[in-house]
Image (cartoon, helix red, strand yellow):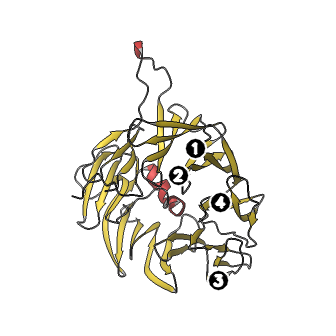
Amino acid sequence: MARLALIGCDDQLYVADPRHGGRLQLTSDPTPQLWGVSPTPPSTWSWPSWSPDGTRIACFELDEDDQDTGPARVHVVHTDGVRQWHCLDVEHGVPLYVQWQPDGEGLLVLVQDGEELELQHIRLDRLGHASSVERGLPLFFTWHPDGERVVVHTASSSESRLVVRDVSGRLPDEVLPQRPANYCAPIFQGDRLIHVDAGGGTNQLVSTDDTGADAQVLLEFEGLGALLRTDDAFLFSAAPDGEGKPYRGLLRIGQELEPVSGEHCLAFFPRGEDLVLVQVDTENNCLTWQLVVAGETRELCRFWPSREQLFHLRFFDQFAPSHRLLSPDGRRLVFCGHPLDTDEQRDEPSVLVYDLERHELRDLGPGAFACFSPVENSTTSEA
């Protein structure tokens, strides 16, 4: 069974069993010395991201009294609770997001530095050093299938661009000819790059090779688009009124375009042939999880999200590949917040796991954010 990485309400990092919530704490605050004085300032930890093999977790550490401006550090923590690597001191700005290199040998870190975002690359065989990959605002990216290059969609000085860049700096850039004015994370489907071209005055979802050649228009749309890859296709939706407004309906695009839901949603996640949605319930001022099976929608539960959970859902298309809310087998959904459909309410948000087969909701105790390992843990058995 895949384990959870979670940030507790004490701002520490844990791994947990999604069935009963048993936790192993991986980080800790300094032990107070005589007269209650700590040797170093207390730390908070945030945004855990699993390594591809499920043995390590990348995470940010910030001083408790200065979380908005730093200093900040990037760590990799082994899930045995013993080994930990201090990868980088972030000298300028605050880290927002980390994603592993596909081979597990490096990290991409997105840093808010003043009015811009900077994407930095860390090699784990060269700790303490980061190379700048790209700067701009906004900034979305995806790994190239070769695992050495990254496709970055960003803008600076009002000019948008989509560039394929080698994180080691050995290969020259490949600047695609399309003008990607619509900001969403591009994806690869096999060797084809799926992204948005607005050069013709309308937003066109296009499929190209990794140089931007052999462009094939898949559809035209208005507003903000979002893409997520599935096993043999990808999902697409658009918010015609732009950022912060609902996505309207979903398409599965493979050999052909297939409508899979007409629902409006804040975020969506593929589950095999099924679909998990987050919707805004304006009447009850909350969010709801919905399961779509063969076009039929079933409400799972209502909740108020934690601050971190809401941030994840706002940028779900970038977070989904690296911070998984669904278990690898698709059976369980994890999220953090306050459930509305239970009698027990606490002041702190909870780590909540919904079993999509038994339709049961379990509260695993306090927590601000949690995500599943990408691989099953062979030492545990299903219950």
Give the foreground label among 2 and 3: 2
Q: Using the image, determine if residue 192 lies above or below residue 141.
A: below
Which residue type does callout 3 highlight?
Val
Judged from the image, the secondary structure of the residue bearing numbered disc 4 is strand
Q: Decide: marks 1, 2 in contact (CB < 8 A)?
A: yes
Residue at 42% x, 16% y: name it. 33
Give the foreground label among 4 and 3: 4
Judged from the image, the secondary structure of the residue bearing numbered disc 3 is strand
Q: Decide: marks 4, 2 in contact (CB < 8 A)?
A: no
State which tag comes first along the sequence, 2 or 3: 2
Relative depth, front residue between 206 and 283: 206
Residue topped by disc 3: 217
Distance, label 4 to label 1, CA atoms, is 16 Å
Badge 3: few (under 14), some or many (20 or more) residues near its Cα, within 10 Å? some
Pinpoint residue 50: horizontal percent, then vertical percent. Answer: 46, 51
Q: Residue furthest top?
A: 34
Distance, label 4 to label 3, CA atoms, is 24 Å
Which label belongs to residue 283? none
Q: Is residue 115 visible?
A: no
Distance, label 2 to label 3, CA atoms, is 34 Å
Residue topped by disc 4: 149
Residue topped by disc 2: 104
Kindly indicate the quadrant of the structure image that contains residue 362: bottom left
Which residue type does callout 1 highlight?
Leu
Kindly indicate the quadrant of the structure image that contains residue 239: bottom right
